[in-house]
Image (cartoon, rainbow, N blue to C red):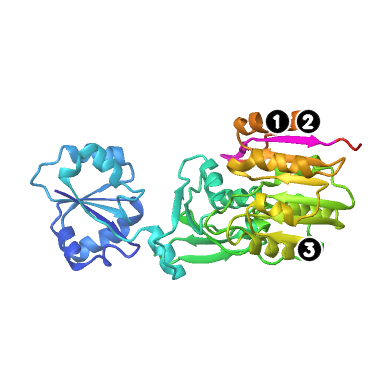
Amino acid sequence: MIDVIGTDAGAPDSLSEALQTVLRQAELIAAPQRMRPALRQWLQDHHSSANCINSDDPIALCQSLTVLSPEQNTVVLASGDPLWFGIGRILVERLGTQRLRFHPGPSSLQLAFARLGRPWQNAEWISLHGRDCAPLTQRLQQRPSALAVLTDPSRGGVDDVRRILSSSGLEATYALWLFEALGHSDERVQCLSQADPTPPDLNPLHLVVLLAEPPADPSPDSLPLFGLDDGLYLQHRDRPGLMTKREVRIQLLADLQLPRQGVLWDLGAGTGSVGLEALRLRPQLQLFAVEQRSGGGTLIEANAKRLGVQPAAVIEADALTALGQMPRPDRVFLGGGGRQRAQLLQAVIDCMNPGGVVVIAMANVEALAELRPLLTNAGWSIQISQQQACRGQPLADGTRLAPMNPVMILSGSKAKG
């Protein structure tokens, strides 16, 4: 058997007595270069004559191990858990599980959450080691409560993580914890704010943990007029990231052709982002926001307070049943509706004031095929567009344009006379 022992920074001295016995009995020990000084001293102190080889090249190591005699006691020393982004995977692929016996040590992820004093059974993780950063962007759109990012100093380091947070509009949504040299004498743990620079003496052995936190209450006067970052909005914990994204929101507000005064319905309001930003543009509008989801009303009211606007009413109910509680609209944004979307649009057509505009955001072509005939039959003028935006994301030493989900926009305008 080849014993593969996971270690911490204090190894070999920090190993359990049982594992030190295994090490004392070894005739061949493979270890990474950074561990060799401590290993040589330990072997000298224990009068061991074991032969030591370098394990920094896993392929060459496997070739050396394949020619060993079955009677030769062999140990491979590795950092943390060898089977978690470690040398264990390559050893299993090349040598097979029958010859290997694993003794895991604490992984970097375990150590990081131990330093935070935070349970991590529900934490998520992603590795950027030699990989494209795009999966991190996609994962952040799901708004995990805790996300560990295994960074790569040469590609996908802490600076890339920070740029992705910024380009995604989520800097205010996550606390960024930086862990360097975990378990070593020069270990450093710090929480970096948006204004803090990345340490100039950053240790190559580092990882990042992102912890979701409610964004701080902004000063409404300090916010831009519209086009607010996605991370500014409070969202449902169980459905994070489900909101109208900034780029689409800007287009929808333009298509609504907001009047100075009048009644705006936001049906299927979600977080309230479209209707609330409309109020920032046209404070004299009467906004009626309708959201069926339980807790949706409370969430929209909280976001309204953050933005410094006051809807005329926030109604937590099925949109079809809520229509009779509201005055006839001049503008309608239809962002939800699901299977009731056709019935809901027909009700909007029937009660819209002359000169009114309805704007509908759709994710699939079936919705367009279903809803367009209703506006055509009503004699409304129609506009159809597709919003396809990209966001700049780190790629090696440059920037890539990461496409966002396309959204089709159907707009209908009722004649004034």
First of labels 3, 1 by sequence position? 3
Name the residue rendered at 13%, 50% in the picture: 73
Q: CA distance from mark 3 to mark 2?
A: 31 Å
Name the residue rendered at 78%, 56% in the picture: 287
Q: CA distance from mark 2 to mark 1?
A: 8 Å
Amino acid identity at mark 3? Gln
Q: Which residue is mark 1?
A: 372
Say few, some or many: other residues with alpha carbon within 10 Å of mark 3 (under 14 / 14 to 19 / 20 or more): some
Residue 178: percent from the left, percent from the top? 52, 61
Q: Residue furthest bottom?
A: 117
Residues tagged 3 and 2 counted as in contact (Cβ below 8 A): no
Instruction: Name the foreground residue: 374 vs 223.
Output: 374
Dot 2: element: strand
Q: Is residue 247 above or below residue 105?
A: above
Residue 231: percent from the left, percent from the top? 65, 55
Q: Which residues are magenta?
A: 394-414
Q: Which residue is mark 2?
A: 382
Foreground mark, 3 or 1, reads: 1
Dot 1: element: helix
Left or right of residue 47, residue 319 in this image: right
Q: Is residue 189 above or below residue 369?
A: below
Instruction: Name the foreground residue: 243 vs 39.
Output: 243
Amino acid identity at mark 2? Ile
Say which mark, if any, is on residue 310: 3
